[in-house]
Image (tube, rainbow, N blue to C red):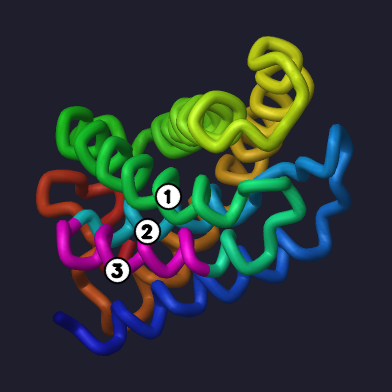
């Protein structure tokens, strides 16, 4: 494992933790999960299984520490690694599209919906500590968060790729895409 990549991933987790902590909750103590966007950014930029596992487990632990949802600690510990692996699988399937203009934002929205579905299923049905319906929670928290993560990723992904293109971390650069090659 590349130490520089691990440092970048830890920065993503830290930035996500700050974003997760400062965004106010807007329905029954649930807040938009901005850590997801940073986790997806790390998965898109460094799509290797060891990195995805470390990133998603760390994101799950930090999310569990900062959650305000009853039962959200256990749900986050399960949700983030499962979501990370599923999104990693999607990234591998759409490899040529992941560096397109809307590939990363769309992936962030889809990943947020996957994560929200897993999280709500665990909190409402398995842990059973929240008294709300799945559809209400999905419409009032998950879908707005997916839209927010889509917009956030549309802004941050091109910036991150541009910064990493100039750095000495070459793992982010796709071999087949001349538009994102070093020196252009």
Q: Which residue is mark 3?
A: 54
Instruction: Tell me if residue 142 comes above or below residue 108 in the rendering.
Output: above
Examine the structure image and report whether residue 51 is included in the region drawn in magenta: yes
Gap in angstroms between the C-alphas marked 2 and 3:
6 Å
Q: Which residue is mark 2?
A: 56
Instruction: Tell me if residue 157 comes above or below residue 82 in the rendering.
Output: below
Q: Quadrant of the C terminus?
A: bottom left
Secondary structure beneath label 3 = helix
Q: Which mark is residue 80?
A: 1
Majority SS type along the magenta span: helix
Task: Assess disc 1: are there few (<14), some (14-19) or many (≥20) residues with their C-alpha within 10 Å of its C-alpha.
Answer: many
User: Does the CB distance between marks 1 and 2 fall below 8 Å?
Assistant: yes
Tell which of 41 and 124 is nearer to you.
Answer: 124
**In which image quadrant can residue 135 be found?**
top right
The residues colored magenta run 48-61
Instruction: Tell me if residue 154 comes above or below residue 59 in the rendering.
Output: above
């Amino acid at each position: 494992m590349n130490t520089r990549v691990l440092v970048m991933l830890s920065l993503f987790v830290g930035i996500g933790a700050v974003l997760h902590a400062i965004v106010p909750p807007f329905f029954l103590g649930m807040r938009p999960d901005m850590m997801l966007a940073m986790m997806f950014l790390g998965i898109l930029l460094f799509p290797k299984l060891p990195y995805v596992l470390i990133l998603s487990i760390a994101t799950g632990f930090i999310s569990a520490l900062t959650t305000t949802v009853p039962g959200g600690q256990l749900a986050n510990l399960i949700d983030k690694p499962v979501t990370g692996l599923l999104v990693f699988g999607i990234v591998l399937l759409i490899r040529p599209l992941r560096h397109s203009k809307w590939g990363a934002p769309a992936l962030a929205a889809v990943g947020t919906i996957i994560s929200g579905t897993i999280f709500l299923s665990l909190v409402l049905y398995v842990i059973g500590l929240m008294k709300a319906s799945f559809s209400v929670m999905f419409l009032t928290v998950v879908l707005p968060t997916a839209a927010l993560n889509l917009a956030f990723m549309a802004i941050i992904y091109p910036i991150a790729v541009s910064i990493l293109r100039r750095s000495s971390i070459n793992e982010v650069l796709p071999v087949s895409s001349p538009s994102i090659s070093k020196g252009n």
